[in-house]
Image: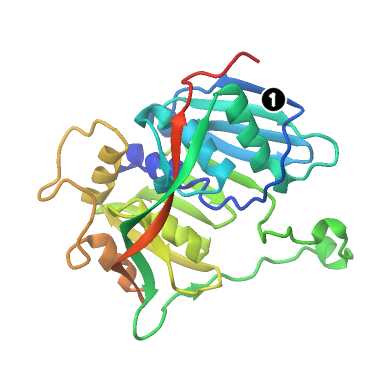
C-alpha cells in the first residue's frame, strides 16, 4: 500500500525548491501536450518521471499540473494557490525555447506569460491572517547531521572558475528537479532544496533525506499537517536525516490528495493537527526541532479565471 501511495508525497514536493528570478519575457516557441496519466501502476513499474529541466535555451517540463506550473511561475508554495480543485488533476508536458540572451532566472516570467496566453489565467494576490505552524529549534539546540560536501573530481579541481560558475543573483542553482520511481515502487525526488527517497517501512513510510535545507524540510512537513509551515529556524546548512512516517498519516495524506483509499485508520481521519499527539510532530523532535502553532499573514495567489485545456500549439 505504501509503495503505491508514496508517489503522492513525491509529486507534491518536487518543485518546492525551485528558486528563480523574474524578468518580463516570453518563450520564443512553446508546445503543450497532455501528459500520460500518473497512476499507481506507473509508479510500481518504474515508469514514473516528473521533471523540470532547463538546459541552455531549452526548457523541458514533464508531467506538471497547472497547480504545479503556477507554483513555479509565481514562486509560491502549494498552500498559497487558491483555485478550483481540478488544477492538480490533469498533467502536461511543456517544451519551450527561450529567446536569445535569456537566462534560466527569467523562466518564471515566461511561464506566467505562457499560462496567461494558453490557459487564459487571470489572478490577483490577497493576504489573510491564518493559523500556521512555525518550525523552530528546540531549547537544547538542533540535533541534525550536516551533509558531507560534494567531492570534486580531478577535472573540477583543476578547472579555473569562469563566468558560468557564478551563482545567480537569487542564490538558486541550475534547475533540474526530477521525480521518478523504480520497479520496486521506491520513489526518489531531487531538487535544489534536497533529495528524498521514499520507501515502505515496517510501520508506514521511511523518508530518507539528503542535502536537505530548512526550506525543503518545511515543505516536507507541510504535507502532513493541516496548516502552512513557516521556517523560523535560521538554519543555513544542508542536512541528512530520516523520518519515519506512520501508515495512518500516509493514508490521510493520500485521502487529502483525492486518492480512494479502501480503509480508514482508527481515530481522526484528518491530517495531523495536534502537536501533542500528531506523530509527525514527535518524529521531528528527535532532531531538536518542533512545530509551534501561531498566527501569521499568508499571501495567496487567487485564480480568477483559468481554462481546463490550452489553446492549440
Q: Identify the residue at image location x=66%, y=57%.
A: 172
**At which x and y percent is residue 312?**
61, 13
128 on left or right of 187: left
Q: Is residue 229 above or below residue 6?
A: below
- Of 170 and 56, the residue lying toward us: 170
Image quadrant containing the N terminus: top left
In the displayed image of the protein, which residue is found farthest to the top?
312
Q: Is residue 272 above or below residue 23?
A: below
- Of 180 and 176, the residue lying toward us: 176
Q: Identify the residue at image location x=33%, y=68%.
A: 284
Q: Secondary structure at mark 1?
A: strand
Toward which corner of the image does residue 162 lie, by quadrant? bottom right
Residue at label 1? 30
Q: Is residue 245 visible?
A: yes
286 on left or right of 77: left
Image quadrant containing the C terminus: top right
Q: Is residue 124 above or below residue 239?
A: above
Q: Is residue 35 above or below residue 137?
A: above
**At which x and y percent is residue 4?**
34, 36
**At which x and y percent is residue 156?**
81, 62
- Of 229 and 247, the residue lying toward us: 229
Q: Identify the residue at image location x=39%, y=59%.
A: 297
Q: Identify the residue at image location x=70%, y=29%.
A: 96
Tell me the colour scheme of the image: rainbow
Q: Is residue 1 visible?
A: no
Q: Residues within 10 Å of mark 1 (few under 14, many from 20)?
A: some
Toward which corner of the image does residue 245 lie, by quadrant? bottom left
77 on left or right of 223: right
**At which x and y percent is residue 205?**
32, 51
In the displayed image of the protein, which residue is found farthest to the bottom?
140
Amino acid at each position: 500500500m505504501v509503495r503505491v501511495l508514496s508517489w503522492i508525497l513525491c509529486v507534491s514536493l518536487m518543485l518546492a525548491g525551485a528558486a528563480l528570478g523574474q524578468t518580463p519575457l516570453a518563450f520564443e516557441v512553446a508546445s503543450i501536450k497532455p501528459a500520460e496519466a500518473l497512476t499507481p501502476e506507473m509508479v510500481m513499474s518504474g515508469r514514473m518521471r516528473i521533471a523540470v529541466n532547463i538546459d541552455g535555451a531549452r526548457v523541458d517540463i514533464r508531467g506538471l499540473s497547472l497547480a504545479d506550473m503556477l507554483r513555479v511561475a509565481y514562486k509560491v508554495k502549494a498552500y498559497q494557490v487558491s483555485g478550483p480543485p481540478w488544477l492538480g488533476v490533469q498533467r502536461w508536458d511543456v517544451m519551450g525555447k527561450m529567446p536569445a540572451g535569456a537566462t534560466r532566472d527569467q523562466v518564471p516570467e515566461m511561464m506566467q506569460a505562457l499560462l496567461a496566453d494558453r490557459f487564459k489565467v487571470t489572478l490577483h494576490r490577497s493576504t489573510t491572517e491564518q493559523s500556521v505552524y512555525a518550525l523552530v529549534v528546540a531549547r537544547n539546540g538542533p540535533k541534525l547531521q550536516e551533509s558531507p560536501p560534494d567531492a570534486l573530481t580531478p577535472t573540477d579541481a583543476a578547472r579555473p572558475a569562469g563566468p558560468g560558475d557564478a551563482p545567480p543573483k537569487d542564490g538558486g542553482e541550475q534547475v533540474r528537479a526530477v521525480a521518478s520511481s523504480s520497479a520496486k515502487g521506491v520513489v526518489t525526488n531531487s531538487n535544489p532544496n534536497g533529495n528524498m527517497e521514499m520507501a515502505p517501512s515496517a510501520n508506514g513510510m521511511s523518508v530518507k533525506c539528503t542535502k536537505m535545507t530548512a526550506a525543503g524540510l518545511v515543505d516536507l512537513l507541510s504535507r502532513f499537517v493541516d496548516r502552512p509551515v513557516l521556517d523560523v529556524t535560521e538554519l543555513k546548512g544542508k542536512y541528512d536525516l530520516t523520518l519515519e512516517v506512520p501508515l495512518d498519516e500516509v493514508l490521510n495524506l493520500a485521502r487529502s490528495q483525492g486518492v480512494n483509499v479502501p480503509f480508514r485508520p482508527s481515530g481522526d481521519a484528518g491530517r495531523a493537527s495536534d502537536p501533542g499527539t500528531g506523530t509527525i510532530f514527535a518524529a521531528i523532535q528527535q532532531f531538536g526541532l518542533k512545530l509551534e502553532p501561531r498566527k501569521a499573514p499568508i499571501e495567496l495567489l487567487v485564480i480568477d479565471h483559468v481554462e481546463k485545456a490550452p489553446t492549440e500549439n
